[in-house]
Amino acid sequence: MATLARDIRASDPFDVSRAELYRDDTWPEVFAAMRAQDPIHRVEDSEFGPYWALSTYKPIVEVESLPDIYSSEVGGFTLTRLTDETVRMPMFIGRDRPIHTGQRRTVAPAFTPSEMQRMSGDIRRRTGEVLDALPWNTEFDWVDTVSVELTTQMLAILFDFPWEDRRKLTEWSDWMGDIELFRDESLRQKRLEKVYEAGAYFRRLWNAKVNAEPTPDLISMMIHSDAMSAMDDNEFMGNLILLIVGGNDTTRNTMSGLIYALDRFPESRAKLEADTGLIPNAASEIIRWQTPLAHMARTATQDTELQGHRIAAGDKIAMWYISANRDRDVFGEDADDYVVDRPNARRHLAFGHGIHRCVGARLAELQVGILMEEMAARRMRVNVLREPDRVAACFVHGYRKMPVEITRY
């Protein structure tokens, strides 16, 4: 039976959950064929079980707009195969209303326009310090030296996390965000150890703030809220995983994707170097082009129909944002290109849509935009020397290493 299952998987070219598609960067061709031939495709068997693969823009927006029919909570919000042995760690992105509403509302004040204004000066200073420390005309790894460092610093500030230990956040994020680890029992257990290690550390930070005056960090906001102050240990760790991975992997991989895209599309790079007024739009465009989280999942709570397809109660639906953001019916014939002056770049679905749209979207845009501005101020051109080492996963879409060299333009 195991051999038969492998044969079924191998025979379905549109099983886009295969990690090697993202490791080898061959996913664009597969999704282009799916969008043209079968945009709502039923995968009968995969490493994660059966699921519907949505590859175009409109059906994803429809599913996201009907959260009472398509649940984030029932079967999980990724393609991870849940078993009786899986330790459940609820997080608000994986909760339905009304719990989702109250918990999201708790952390939302950390990402308001006024908070972005308050933090922008510090983000700019720290970004400048990192860029000023870079070697010129010398090879180095952009991912670790810039992308990881900047996003880890930002997370440390959001959590009021001890500065000297901030790289623990990077390590925990890498373990927490890798759903491929669920395939291997020993790695799954190792991941669980890392989660408990993070939980114990954050519990100490929580206990130190319980009787303190409120401060504008995420832990204090949770403590002083009705929706999250009484979380049990598993829910506490679940929401930590969400905020750590959401705040680290996504922005970090967009910052790396920016460098790769500018190198790959020299016409866009030339436009951006000539006109810094394009930066806000170019920041939205790189979030679209990179799409740092490839998919999210939902589970149908009832029998329903999705654009002519019969969806049964209990069916898993994977919304492939990474493909919808290349939908030519929305973004044009050049949807696979990085176009800094694309008129509708902000229509991307990289942040999701509807009630689960990324709560930290403004902060991600701010960080990426400031990085571009500070690079422009130094007339810094980053050249990719060799193909990057990519993450082998169908959830986090990113880079492990990217060898670069800086020159001046």
Image: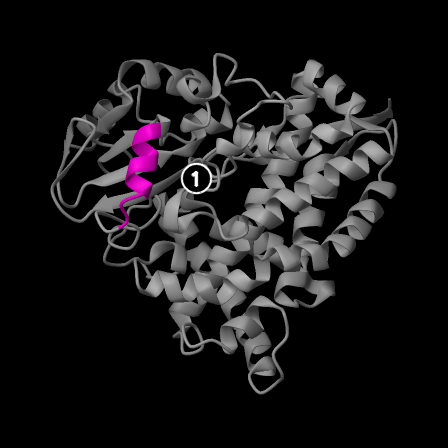
**Toward the viewer: 221 or 156?**
221
In the rendered structure, the answer to whether residue 98 lies left or right of residue 278 reads left
Question: At 74% across and 30% down in the image, what residue appears?
Answer: 277
Residue 109 x/y as whole percent: 55, 63
Q: Name the quadrant of the C terminus.
A: top right
What amino acid type is highlighted by mark number 1?
A: Phe
Report the magenta stretch's main SS: helix
Q: Nearer the viewer, residue 18 or 304?
A: 304
Percent x, y of residue 313:
13, 44
Q: Residue furthest bottom?
A: 211
Q: Residue at x 87, y 42 (%)?
A: 132
Q: Residue 266, image x and y in percent?
A: 71, 15
The residue singled out by tag 1 in the image is 395
Helix, strand or loop at disc 1? loop
Asked if residue 389 can be seen in this view, the reply is: yes
Query: Is residue 401 shown in magenta?
Result: no
